[in-house]
């Protein structure tokens, strides 16, 4: 085992969203120092000056060639994730990467291979499995409250108009891990095959970049747990629905649904057999705890519920807490501790590949009019 006093050195690449993570790394008791990286020199200077980061880099190559860092957290455009993750691992550094891990099966295989060859940690920073609602559901599962899980459903609704150019026309299921991951994580399962259908009409200029005609895609997955399947819907354009990453768990004894971003979950409980037909059902709103007990005290403030945020300041959420429903400090802590303890992180390269491949294969099925597509396993690569 590594010395428990060991401190690691981390660089965060990409400040538009990555800026929400750099101060958390800085606060972590197992981190010696943090560097920041962004090709936008003005943003790099402004962020570094505002938040007090002196180690600054204008391109990823500087980090790859540097011996000043043990790990790099990639918060870069989606099309770059696959190649950059492999480059980080091959440079002899641990790699954390925002979702999705990649956009092709070949890239996922390369990440898994690079992780094994380098013997460095890879972690996909999937926020959806560290939110208040998910941690509450996880605790219920551990207590046996759900009973046997009978079915799972997830959805991610978002409008991407006027986002950076690489988002325009992106296949919905290529960015579906926020909806898929909670279902696979809570069931401990892998998706093995999928039927997916595209829906809606995409305007012509959005179809050009990726050849994707669908603003909405809906998939049915068969999982590798006996008699268990899951449904996932993902929207990106032309669909009037407020933002939501949701997951629903349907069990024999209890079920949980989360439908609206700013509303509490609904817990359903199976009651006694009624005179006549069926059983009674009860329902209640539940407010999940923020779970600071899972974190070192230095990170606890980053999961505090906050009411008012400044929409013009993309990094205010990290100062006030509650980024992606409190998930950010949990992700940072798991990545850092996995390195210090010399163990695999919770969302390692194989898990990340399995979760991401489910979406890639779903889009392939949609482009084949819903034909069955088998989802590869990455366990034996």
Image (cartoon, rainbow, N blue to C red):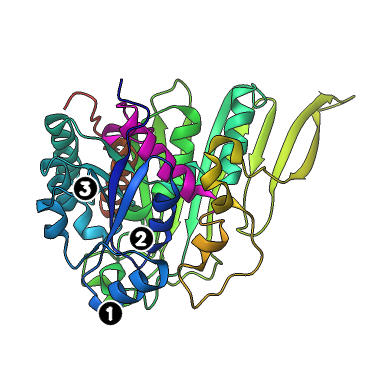
Residue 149 versus residue 330 in the image, above or below: above
- Which disc, if any, is residue 101? none
Q: Residue visible at 52% across and 62% down?
A: 319
Picture quadrant where residue 212 is located: bottom left
Per the rendered image, the range of residues in magenta is 325-350
Question: Residue tagged by mark 2?
Answer: 18
Element on which disc 2 rests: helix
234 to the left or right of 118? right
Query: Earlier along the polypeptide chain: callout 2 or callout 3?
Result: 2
Rate crowding at label 1 as few (under 14), some (14 to 19) or many (20 or more) other CA atoms within 10 Å: few
Residue 69: image tag: 3
Taking depth in this image into account, of 236 and 75 the one nearest to the observer is 75
Q: Is residue 370 visible?
A: no
Q: Earlier in the sequence, mark 3 or mark 1?
A: 1
Position of residue 310 relative to residue 129, above or below, is: below
Question: Element type at marker 1?
Answer: helix
Residue 136 in magenta stretch = no
Viewer-nearest residue: 235 or 349: 349
- Depth-wise, is mark 3 or mark 1 nearer the camera? 3
- 371 vs 18: above or below: above
Quick one: 125 or 250, which is closer to the camera?
125
As drawn, the label of residue 42 is: 1
* In this view, the mark in front (2 or 1): 1
């Amino acid at each position: 085992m590594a010395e428990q006093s060991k401190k690691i050195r981390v660089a965060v690449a990409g400040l538009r969203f990555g800026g929400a993570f750099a101060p958390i790394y800085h606060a972590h008791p197992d981190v010696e120092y943090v560097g920041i990286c962004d090709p936008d020199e003005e943003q790099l200077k402004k962020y570094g000056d505002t938040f007090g980061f002196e180690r600054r880099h204008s391109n990823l190559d500087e980090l790859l060639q540097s011996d000043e860092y043990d790990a790099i957290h990639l918060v870069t455009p989606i099309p770059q994730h696959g190649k950059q993750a492999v480059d980080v691992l091959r440079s002899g550094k641990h790699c954390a990467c925002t979702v999705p891990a990649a956009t092709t099966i070949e890239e996922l295989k390369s990440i898994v291979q690079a992780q094994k060859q380098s013997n460095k940690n890879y972690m996909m920073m999937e926020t959806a499995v560290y939110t208040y609602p998910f941690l509450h559901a996880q605790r219920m599962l551990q207590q046996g409250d759900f009973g046997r899980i009978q079915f799972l459903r997830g959805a991610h609704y978002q409008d991407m108009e006027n986002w950076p150019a690489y988002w325009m026309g992106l296949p919905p299921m290529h960015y579906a891990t926020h909806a898929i991951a909670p279902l696979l994580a809570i069931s401990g399962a892998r998706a093995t095959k999928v039927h997916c259908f595209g829906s809606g009409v995409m305007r012509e200029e959005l179809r050009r970049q990726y050849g994707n005609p669908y603003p909405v895609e809906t998939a049915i997955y068969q999982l590798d747990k006996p008699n268990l399947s899951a449904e996932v819907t993902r929207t990106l354009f032309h669909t009037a629905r407020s933002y939501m990453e949701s997951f629903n768990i349907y069990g024999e004894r209890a079920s949980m649904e989360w439908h609206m971003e700013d509303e509490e979950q609904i817990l359903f409980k199976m009651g006694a057999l009624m005179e006549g037909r069926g059983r009674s059902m009860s329902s209640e709103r539940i407010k999940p705890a923020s779970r600071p007990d899972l974190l070192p005290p230095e990170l606890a403030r980053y999961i505090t519920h906050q009411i008012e945020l400044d929409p013009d300041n993309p990094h205010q959420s990290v100062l006030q807490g509650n980024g992606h429903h409190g998930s950010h400090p949990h992700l940072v802590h798991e990545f850092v501790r996995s390195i210090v303890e010399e163990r695999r992180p919770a969302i390692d390269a194989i898990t990340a590949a399995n979760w991401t491949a489910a979406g890639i294969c779903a889009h392939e099925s949609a482009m084949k009019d819903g034909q069955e597509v088998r989802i590869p396993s990455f366990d034996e690569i």
